[in-house]
Amino acid sequence: MTEIETLLKATIGEMERLLATKTVIGEPITAGGKTVIPLLSVGAGFGVGAGSGKGDEGTGGGAGGGFGMKPIAVIVIEEDAVRVEPVRKGGGSIIEQLADKVPQLIKKEIEEWEEGREEKKEKEAEEKEGEGKGRGKEKGKEKGKEIKVD
């Protein structure tokens, strides 16, 4: 068996293990006369590569993949009824909830940064304007009579 075949078989074997029925249909949870069974959406992807050479030079290989899941619905089993309830948006993982908030946070930071920049420009303009009008002033002090205190 070649190196690429070994990598491919190992990767597919691991994916089969991860994509079992228990992965898509979660373990039932029973409480208060009701049983709830979670249903998940599962996605996976992978890649395998190998190299070769002549003599003592060359060879190499690798495999990599990604796997993700999110809740999409639950089956609710009651004494006299069974129903499927979809999971509403925002009921996903903490990572999904954070990912939804990132654009809003970035926009807020940019707005605050721009506001600070505008305030700084306005302050600098006011200081320059004050320097132009106050020619009789020297570093914020008015010139005038000296008063000596003994």
Image: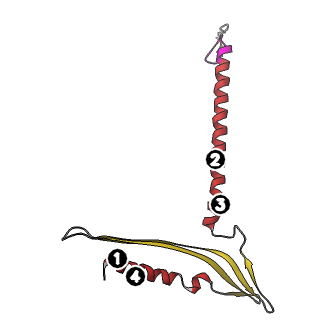
Q: Earlier in the sequence, mark 2 or mark 1?
A: 1
**Mark 3 or 4, which is nearer the eye?**
4
Q: Which residue carries the number 2 mark?
A: 109
Residue found 61% across the figure and 17% down from its top: 139
Q: Earlier in the sequence, mark 2 or mark 4?
A: 4
Secondary structure of residue under mark 4: helix
Indicate the amino acid at tag 1. Ile
Quarter of the rendering containing residue 12: bottom left
Measure how far apart labels 3 and 4 are at the Cα level. 37 Å
**Callout 2: few (<14), some (14-19), or many (20+) C-alpha neighbours within 10 Å?**
few
- Give residue 107's position: percent from left, percent from top: 65, 48
Q: Earlier in the sequence, mark 1 or mark 3?
A: 1
Quarter of the rendering containing residue 121: top right
User: What colour scheme does the image use?
Assistant: secondary structure
Indicate the amino acid at tag 4. Lys
Q: Which residue carries the number 4 mark?
A: 9
Secondary structure of residue under mark 2: helix
Q: Which residue carries the number 1 mark?
A: 4
Residue found 65% across the figure and 64% down from its top: 97
